[in-house]
Image (spheres, grey):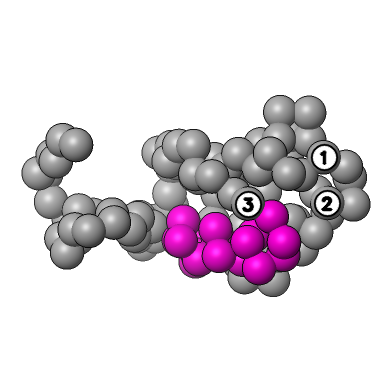
Amino acid sequence: MFIFSIRDMCVSSQAEAVLDAICHLDAHASVSINLVAHEVRIAPRTAGATALSDAITHAGFDPELQACARVMRGPGQAPPKIPFAGLDHDFTASPEVVER
């Protein structure tokens, strides 16, 4: 699950635009929008954080990734690939920890 803060999302029509952008990218994503907190929680099926952020940006908003939360997956579902800026290592299959 990805949690985005979208400070420029203030009214329900903007929340619907964000929802449309996310659903256009990943039709089976589970999306929860808290308009008062300017927060969007997304449990994607296929899209990663970068693609989701790009879709929200393309809809005219400025998303900021706040957190990546662990979600339970069914059998055969792989964890999402989370991009790490400046690192060329795939952390989804490695127990390594990198501190910044």
User: How far apart are the alpha carbons under marks 3 and 2?
Assistant: 12 Å
* Label 3 Cα neighbours within 10 Å, binned few <14 / some 14-19 / many ≥20: some
Secondary structure, mark 1, is loop
Left or right, residue 16 beside residue 45: right
**Residue 59 screen position, x and y as percent:** 72, 64
- Rendered view: 75 above or below 59: above
Identify the magenta region.
45-61
Distance between mark 1 and mark 2 Cα atoms: 7 Å
Horizontal relation, residue 37 to residue 48: left or right: right
Looking at the image, which residue is at 82% across and 40% down? 10
The residue pinned by badge 1 equals: 10
Q: x, y (%) of residue 46?
A: 49, 66
Q: Residue at x 49, y 37 (%)?
A: 66
Disc 1 + disc 2, Cβ < 8 Å: yes
- Classify the position of the C terminus by image quarter: top left
Q: Which of 35 and 8 lies nearest the eye of the viewer?
A: 8
Task: Give, as a three-letter code, the residue at label 1.
Answer: Cys
> Magenta includes 57?
yes
- SS state under label 3: loop
Q: Is tag 3's residue or tag 1's residue first in the polypeptide sequence? A: 1
Q: Is residue 75 or residue 94 the one in the foreground?
A: 94
Residue marked by disc 2: 14
Q: Which mark is residue 50?
A: none
Circles 3 and 1: CB atoms closer than 8 Å: no
Residue 9 position, x and y percent, is 76, 44
